[in-house]
Image (cartoon, rainbow, N blue to C red):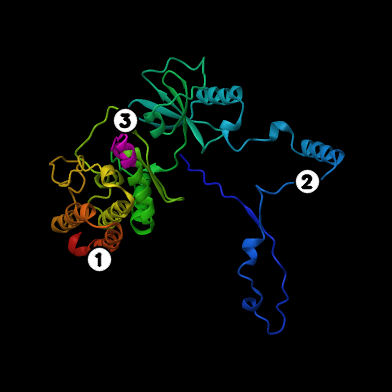
Amino acid sequence: MLAMKIYNNTILNNQYHNYTGSKSVAQTYNPNYLTNNRITFKSSKIINLPECILSKCKATIKKILPNNDIKPKDLMDLPERRILEICKNALSKKVPLGQGQEATVYKIEEFPREYCIRVDRKNCQGFDNLKLNYNLDKFDKANFVVAKLGKGLTLMQYISGIPLKIMRNSDTISGIKVKESMQELIANNFPEESFLKVINQIENNRKNGIIFDRKGENLLVDPMIQEITAIDFSPKFNDIEYNPISYIYHALDVDGTPFAPKVLGKLINAYAERLKTCSLKDLNLDVLDTNFYHRGFMDDAFNKFKDKDLLETCRSKLFDDLLEAKKTMQSKDFNDYVDYFKYEIENLLIDPIERNFQEFY
Protein backbone atom coordinates (compact mmCIF):
# COMPACT_ATOMS: atom_id res chain seq x y z
CA MET A 1 0.00 0.00 0.00
CA LEU A 2 1.16 3.45 -0.65
CA ALA A 3 0.50 5.06 2.68
CA MET A 4 -1.23 8.21 1.51
CA LYS A 5 0.02 11.05 3.68
CA ILE A 6 -2.30 14.02 3.24
CA TYR A 7 -1.14 17.27 4.70
CA ASN A 8 -3.46 20.14 5.50
CA ASN A 9 -2.16 22.96 3.32
CA THR A 10 -1.99 26.36 4.93
CA ILE A 11 -1.99 29.94 3.72
CA LEU A 12 0.16 32.22 5.80
CA ASN A 13 -1.07 35.78 5.95
CA ASN A 14 2.43 37.19 5.57
CA GLN A 15 3.30 40.79 6.22
CA TYR A 16 5.56 42.72 3.90
CA HIS A 17 8.52 44.46 5.51
CA ASN A 18 10.93 47.09 4.27
CA TYR A 19 14.43 45.74 4.84
CA THR A 20 16.26 48.82 3.53
CA GLY A 21 18.74 50.52 5.77
CA SER A 22 20.08 48.83 8.88
CA LYS A 23 16.84 47.20 10.01
CA SER A 24 17.29 43.40 10.22
CA VAL A 25 14.90 40.50 9.78
CA ALA A 26 15.33 39.62 13.45
CA GLN A 27 14.18 43.09 14.43
CA THR A 28 10.95 42.92 12.41
CA TYR A 29 10.01 39.29 13.09
CA ASN A 30 7.16 38.66 15.49
CA PRO A 31 7.40 35.03 16.74
CA ASN A 32 3.68 34.89 17.52
CA TYR A 33 2.55 36.38 14.25
CA LEU A 34 2.36 33.29 12.03
CA THR A 35 0.64 31.21 14.67
CA ASN A 36 -2.08 33.74 15.24
CA ASN A 37 -2.74 34.45 11.57
CA ARG A 38 -2.78 30.99 10.03
CA ILE A 39 -5.76 30.21 7.81
CA THR A 40 -6.36 26.65 6.66
CA PHE A 41 -8.02 25.66 3.40
CA LYS A 42 -10.28 23.35 5.37
CA SER A 43 -11.66 26.13 7.51
CA SER A 44 -11.83 28.76 4.74
CA LYS A 45 -15.32 29.50 3.42
CA ILE A 46 -16.86 31.79 0.84
CA ILE A 47 -19.55 33.65 2.70
CA ASN A 48 -22.13 36.35 2.01
CA LEU A 49 -22.13 35.92 -1.78
CA PRO A 50 -25.46 36.48 -3.56
CA GLU A 51 -27.02 33.34 -5.03
CA CYS A 52 -26.85 34.75 -8.56
CA ILE A 53 -23.05 35.08 -8.30
CA LEU A 54 -22.70 31.63 -6.79
CA SER A 55 -24.73 30.07 -9.61
CA LYS A 56 -22.55 31.82 -12.21
CA CYS A 57 -19.42 30.50 -10.48
CA LYS A 58 -20.79 26.98 -10.55
CA ALA A 59 -21.73 27.25 -14.22
CA THR A 60 -18.27 28.57 -15.13
CA ILE A 61 -16.54 25.76 -13.22
CA LYS A 62 -18.79 23.22 -14.94
CA LYS A 63 -17.73 24.53 -18.37
CA ILE A 64 -14.03 24.49 -17.49
CA LEU A 65 -14.11 21.08 -15.77
CA PRO A 66 -16.74 18.80 -17.27
CA ASN A 67 -17.99 16.11 -14.89
CA ASN A 68 -16.41 13.29 -16.86
CA ASP A 69 -12.95 14.86 -16.40
CA ILE A 70 -13.20 15.20 -12.64
CA LYS A 71 -11.56 12.26 -10.90
CA PRO A 72 -12.11 11.77 -7.15
CA LYS A 73 -8.98 11.57 -5.05
CA ASP A 74 -10.10 8.26 -3.61
CA LEU A 75 -11.76 5.25 -5.24
CA MET A 76 -13.97 4.73 -2.22
CA ASP A 77 -15.50 8.21 -2.66
CA LEU A 78 -17.27 6.96 -5.81
CA PRO A 79 -20.76 5.45 -5.83
CA GLU A 80 -20.80 1.69 -5.26
CA ARG A 81 -21.88 0.99 -8.85
CA ARG A 82 -18.89 2.91 -10.20
CA ILE A 83 -16.46 1.20 -7.81
CA LEU A 84 -17.64 -2.19 -9.06
CA GLU A 85 -17.32 -1.08 -12.71
CA ILE A 86 -13.70 -0.06 -12.09
CA CYS A 87 -12.99 -3.38 -10.36
CA LYS A 88 -14.52 -5.35 -13.26
CA ASN A 89 -12.45 -3.33 -15.71
CA ALA A 90 -9.26 -4.16 -13.77
CA LEU A 91 -10.15 -7.86 -13.69
CA SER A 92 -10.81 -7.90 -17.43
CA LYS A 93 -7.44 -6.31 -18.19
CA LYS A 94 -5.54 -8.52 -15.70
CA VAL A 95 -2.45 -6.35 -15.36
CA PRO A 96 -0.48 -8.22 -12.66
CA LEU A 97 1.24 -6.49 -9.75
CA GLY A 98 2.52 -9.65 -8.12
CA GLN A 99 1.93 -13.36 -7.80
CA GLY A 100 2.30 -15.78 -4.90
CA GLN A 101 1.64 -19.45 -4.34
CA GLU A 102 -2.07 -18.94 -3.73
CA ALA A 103 -3.08 -15.68 -5.38
CA THR A 104 -2.39 -13.06 -8.02
CA VAL A 105 -2.73 -9.32 -7.37
CA TYR A 106 -3.95 -7.13 -10.22
CA LYS A 107 -3.52 -3.43 -10.83
CA ILE A 108 -6.39 -0.92 -10.82
CA GLU A 109 -5.17 1.48 -13.47
CA GLU A 110 -7.50 4.33 -12.54
CA PHE A 111 -6.05 4.32 -9.00
CA PRO A 112 -2.69 2.62 -9.58
CA ARG A 113 -0.94 3.43 -6.31
CA GLU A 114 -3.95 3.35 -4.05
CA TYR A 115 -5.85 0.09 -4.58
CA CYS A 116 -5.47 -3.34 -6.13
CA ILE A 117 -7.42 -6.62 -6.41
CA ARG A 118 -6.31 -9.96 -5.03
CA VAL A 119 -7.59 -13.08 -6.79
CA ASP A 120 -7.34 -16.38 -4.94
CA ARG A 121 -6.72 -18.84 -7.74
CA LYS A 122 -8.23 -21.83 -5.89
CA ASN A 123 -11.37 -20.22 -4.52
CA CYS A 124 -12.31 -17.59 -7.11
CA GLN A 125 -15.57 -18.45 -8.89
CA GLY A 126 -15.55 -15.77 -11.58
CA PHE A 127 -15.86 -12.02 -11.95
CA ASP A 128 -19.51 -11.63 -12.97
CA ASN A 129 -21.42 -10.99 -9.75
CA LEU A 130 -19.22 -8.57 -7.85
CA LYS A 131 -20.54 -7.01 -4.65
CA LEU A 132 -18.95 -4.82 -2.01
CA ASN A 133 -18.93 -6.60 1.32
CA TYR A 134 -17.43 -4.57 4.18
CA ASN A 135 -17.86 -7.34 6.77
CA LEU A 136 -14.15 -7.90 7.49
CA ASP A 137 -12.49 -10.01 10.17
CA LYS A 138 -9.24 -9.21 11.99
CA PHE A 139 -7.17 -11.11 9.40
CA ASP A 140 -8.71 -9.09 6.55
CA LYS A 141 -7.88 -5.85 8.31
CA ALA A 142 -4.32 -6.95 9.08
CA ASN A 143 -3.85 -7.74 5.37
CA PHE A 144 -5.09 -4.32 4.18
CA VAL A 145 -8.40 -5.60 2.76
CA VAL A 146 -10.85 -2.78 2.05
CA ALA A 147 -13.81 -4.90 0.93
CA LYS A 148 -14.65 -8.39 -0.29
CA LEU A 149 -15.84 -8.50 -3.90
CA GLY A 150 -16.88 -12.16 -4.02
CA LYS A 151 -15.55 -15.60 -3.20
CA GLY A 152 -11.78 -15.45 -3.55
CA LEU A 153 -11.84 -11.78 -4.59
CA THR A 154 -10.79 -8.88 -2.38
CA LEU A 155 -10.29 -5.17 -2.95
CA MET A 156 -7.11 -4.13 -1.14
CA GLN A 157 -5.02 -1.10 -0.36
CA TYR A 158 -1.94 -0.89 -2.52
CA ILE A 159 1.36 -1.35 -0.66
CA SER A 160 4.29 0.34 -2.36
CA GLY A 161 7.76 -1.17 -2.30
CA ILE A 162 9.60 -4.33 -3.30
CA PRO A 163 10.78 -7.37 -1.35
CA LEU A 164 14.54 -7.45 -0.82
CA LYS A 165 14.86 -11.22 -0.62
CA ILE A 166 17.25 -12.04 -3.47
CA MET A 167 15.99 -14.91 -5.62
CA ARG A 168 19.09 -16.09 -7.49
CA ASN A 169 17.10 -18.43 -9.77
CA SER A 170 14.61 -15.82 -10.95
CA ASP A 171 15.95 -12.30 -10.31
CA THR A 172 17.76 -10.60 -13.16
CA ILE A 173 21.28 -9.26 -12.66
CA SER A 174 19.97 -5.67 -12.66
CA GLY A 175 17.21 -6.68 -10.24
CA ILE A 176 19.75 -8.11 -7.81
CA LYS A 177 21.80 -4.92 -8.04
CA VAL A 178 18.72 -2.85 -7.20
CA LYS A 179 18.00 -4.99 -4.13
CA GLU A 180 21.61 -4.79 -2.97
CA SER A 181 21.53 -1.01 -3.36
CA MET A 182 18.34 -0.83 -1.32
CA GLN A 183 19.87 -3.03 1.39
CA GLU A 184 22.72 -0.54 1.64
CA LEU A 185 20.24 2.34 1.69
CA ILE A 186 18.33 0.75 4.57
CA ALA A 187 21.51 0.20 6.57
CA ASN A 188 22.86 3.70 6.08
CA ASN A 189 19.84 5.96 5.70
CA PHE A 190 16.62 4.48 7.09
CA PRO A 191 15.85 5.99 10.52
CA GLU A 192 15.08 3.97 13.61
CA GLU A 193 11.41 4.93 13.20
CA SER A 194 11.19 2.84 10.00
CA PHE A 195 12.16 -0.28 11.93
CA LEU A 196 10.04 0.60 14.96
CA LYS A 197 6.94 0.95 12.79
CA VAL A 198 7.20 -2.51 11.24
CA ILE A 199 8.12 -4.12 14.59
CA ASN A 200 4.98 -2.59 16.08
CA GLN A 201 2.94 -3.81 13.11
CA ILE A 202 4.13 -7.40 13.56
CA GLU A 203 3.91 -7.42 17.36
CA ASN A 204 0.53 -5.67 17.61
CA ASN A 205 -0.96 -8.20 15.21
CA ARG A 206 0.60 -11.11 17.07
CA LYS A 207 -0.96 -9.79 20.27
CA ASN A 208 -4.32 -10.37 18.52
CA GLY A 209 -3.39 -13.88 17.39
CA ILE A 210 -2.42 -12.82 13.86
CA ILE A 211 0.99 -14.17 12.86
CA PHE A 212 3.23 -12.74 10.15
CA ASP A 213 4.37 -15.23 7.51
CA ARG A 214 8.06 -14.39 7.60
CA LYS A 215 8.83 -15.34 3.99
CA GLY A 216 11.23 -12.84 2.43
CA GLU A 217 8.79 -11.77 -0.26
CA ASN A 218 6.25 -10.76 2.39
CA LEU A 219 8.16 -7.69 3.54
CA LEU A 220 8.06 -4.68 1.21
CA VAL A 221 10.52 -1.79 1.33
CA ASP A 222 9.73 1.64 -0.11
CA PRO A 223 12.90 3.78 -0.31
CA MET A 224 10.96 6.94 -1.26
CA ILE A 225 8.98 7.17 1.99
CA GLN A 226 11.46 5.05 3.99
CA GLU A 227 8.86 2.52 5.09
CA ILE A 228 9.05 -1.23 5.66
CA THR A 229 5.70 -3.04 5.61
CA ALA A 230 4.74 -6.63 6.36
CA ILE A 231 2.00 -7.77 3.98
CA ASP A 232 1.03 -11.38 4.77
CA PHE A 233 -0.63 -12.28 8.07
CA SER A 234 -2.21 -15.70 8.22
CA PRO A 235 -4.65 -17.50 10.53
CA LYS A 236 -2.87 -20.75 9.65
CA PHE A 237 0.75 -19.67 10.11
CA ASN A 238 2.10 -20.23 13.62
CA ASP A 239 5.83 -19.83 14.08
CA ILE A 240 6.83 -19.57 17.74
CA GLU A 241 10.54 -19.89 17.01
CA TYR A 242 11.34 -16.40 15.76
CA ASN A 243 11.02 -12.94 17.24
CA PRO A 244 10.29 -9.78 15.24
CA ILE A 245 13.97 -8.86 15.00
CA SER A 246 14.72 -12.18 13.31
CA TYR A 247 11.61 -11.90 11.11
CA ILE A 248 12.66 -8.58 9.64
CA TYR A 249 16.39 -9.31 9.45
CA HIS A 250 15.63 -12.57 7.61
CA ALA A 251 13.27 -10.90 5.12
CA LEU A 252 15.66 -8.03 4.36
CA ASP A 253 18.23 -10.68 3.31
CA VAL A 254 21.26 -8.81 4.63
CA ASP A 255 22.85 -11.76 6.46
CA GLY A 256 26.45 -12.21 5.33
CA THR A 257 26.51 -8.80 3.63
CA PRO A 258 28.46 -5.70 4.69
CA PHE A 259 25.15 -4.19 5.84
CA ALA A 260 24.24 -6.88 8.40
CA PRO A 261 25.72 -5.22 11.53
CA LYS A 262 24.06 -1.86 10.90
CA VAL A 263 20.67 -3.40 10.14
CA LEU A 264 20.88 -5.59 13.25
CA GLY A 265 21.84 -2.55 15.33
CA LYS A 266 18.87 -0.55 14.06
CA LEU A 267 16.48 -3.44 14.67
CA ILE A 268 17.72 -4.00 18.21
CA ASN A 269 17.55 -0.31 19.05
CA ALA A 270 14.06 0.01 17.56
CA TYR A 271 12.88 -2.92 19.69
CA ALA A 272 14.50 -1.31 22.74
CA GLU A 273 12.67 1.95 21.98
CA ARG A 274 9.40 0.02 21.80
CA LEU A 275 9.99 -1.29 25.30
CA LYS A 276 9.64 2.27 26.65
CA THR A 277 5.92 2.38 25.90
CA CYS A 278 4.94 -1.28 25.61
CA SER A 279 3.50 -2.95 28.71
CA LEU A 280 4.87 -6.29 29.88
CA LYS A 281 1.65 -8.10 28.98
CA ASP A 282 2.07 -7.02 25.35
CA LEU A 283 5.66 -8.18 24.95
CA ASN A 284 4.85 -11.72 23.79
CA LEU A 285 7.56 -13.06 26.07
CA ASP A 286 6.11 -16.56 25.76
CA VAL A 287 6.96 -16.66 22.05
CA LEU A 288 10.28 -14.80 22.04
CA ASP A 289 13.01 -17.27 21.19
CA THR A 290 15.88 -15.64 23.06
CA ASN A 291 18.41 -17.98 21.48
CA PHE A 292 17.25 -16.99 18.01
CA TYR A 293 20.25 -17.76 15.83
CA HIS A 294 21.29 -21.37 16.44
CA ARG A 295 18.35 -23.51 15.31
CA GLY A 296 20.33 -25.31 12.63
CA PHE A 297 18.25 -24.61 9.51
CA MET A 298 19.91 -23.33 6.36
CA ASP A 299 17.67 -20.27 6.00
CA ASP A 300 17.79 -19.17 9.65
CA ALA A 301 18.54 -15.56 10.41
CA PHE A 302 22.13 -14.81 11.50
CA ASN A 303 23.61 -18.04 10.07
CA LYS A 304 26.15 -15.97 8.11
CA PHE A 305 26.81 -13.30 10.73
CA LYS A 306 30.58 -13.54 11.00
CA ASP A 307 31.21 -12.47 14.60
CA LYS A 308 29.06 -14.81 16.70
CA ASP A 309 30.52 -13.48 19.95
CA LEU A 310 29.43 -9.98 19.02
CA LEU A 311 25.98 -11.29 18.10
CA GLU A 312 25.65 -13.09 21.44
CA THR A 313 26.71 -9.95 23.31
CA CYS A 314 23.97 -7.92 21.62
CA ARG A 315 21.37 -10.64 22.12
CA SER A 316 22.23 -10.95 25.80
CA LYS A 317 22.10 -7.20 26.38
CA LEU A 318 18.62 -7.02 24.84
CA PHE A 319 16.88 -10.19 25.98
CA ASP A 320 18.64 -10.80 29.27
CA ASP A 321 19.59 -7.37 30.63
CA LEU A 322 17.09 -4.93 29.11
CA LEU A 323 14.01 -7.13 29.37
CA GLU A 324 14.90 -7.93 32.97
CA ALA A 325 15.24 -4.21 33.69
CA LYS A 326 11.78 -3.67 32.16
CA LYS A 327 10.33 -5.90 34.86
CA THR A 328 11.99 -4.15 37.80
CA MET A 329 12.73 -0.48 37.01
CA GLN A 330 10.48 2.53 37.31
CA SER A 331 9.43 4.06 33.99
CA LYS A 332 11.75 7.09 34.06
CA ASP A 333 14.77 5.07 35.15
CA PHE A 334 14.04 2.45 32.53
CA ASN A 335 13.77 5.04 29.75
CA ASP A 336 17.17 6.41 30.71
CA TYR A 337 18.53 2.87 30.72
CA VAL A 338 17.15 2.29 27.20
CA ASP A 339 18.93 5.39 25.93
CA TYR A 340 22.21 4.16 27.40
CA PHE A 341 21.57 0.68 25.97
CA LYS A 342 21.10 2.15 22.48
CA TYR A 343 24.36 4.07 22.82
CA GLU A 344 26.14 0.80 23.72
CA ILE A 345 24.62 -1.05 20.76
CA GLU A 346 25.70 1.68 18.37
CA ASN A 347 29.25 1.45 19.67
CA LEU A 348 29.21 -2.34 19.41
CA LEU A 349 27.56 -2.79 16.03
CA ILE A 350 27.82 0.42 14.06
CA ASP A 351 30.93 2.51 14.71
CA PRO A 352 33.50 -0.31 15.16
CA ILE A 353 32.14 -2.16 12.14
CA GLU A 354 32.62 0.92 9.99
CA ARG A 355 36.16 1.39 11.20
CA ASN A 356 37.25 -2.26 11.09
CA PHE A 357 34.91 -3.82 8.55
CA GLN A 358 37.47 -6.13 6.98
CA GLU A 359 38.17 -7.72 10.34
CA PHE A 360 34.70 -9.27 10.31
CA TYR A 361 33.83 -9.49 6.61
Residue 223 at x, y percent in the picture: 42, 50
Q: Earlier in the sequence, mark 3 or mark 1?
A: 3
Which range of residues does the magenta coloring cover?
A: 202-216
- In the image, which is nearer the foreground, mark 2 or mark 1? 2
Q: Which residue is mark 3?
A: 234
- Residue drawn at (69%, 34%) of the image: 69
Of 317 and 326, which appears nearest the observer? 326
Image quadrant in which you'd find residue 285: top left
Whether residue 209 appears in magenta in the rendering, the answer is yes
Q: Earlier in the sequence, mark 2 or mark 3?
A: 2
Q: CA distance from mark 2 to mark 1?
A: 61 Å
Mark 3 is on which residue type? Ser
* Residue 110 seen in this snapshot: no
Q: CA distance from mark 3 to mark 1?
A: 38 Å
Q: CA distance from mark 2 to mark 3?
A: 53 Å
Q: In the visual, does 349 lie left or right of 223?
A: left
Q: Which residue is mark 2?
A: 47
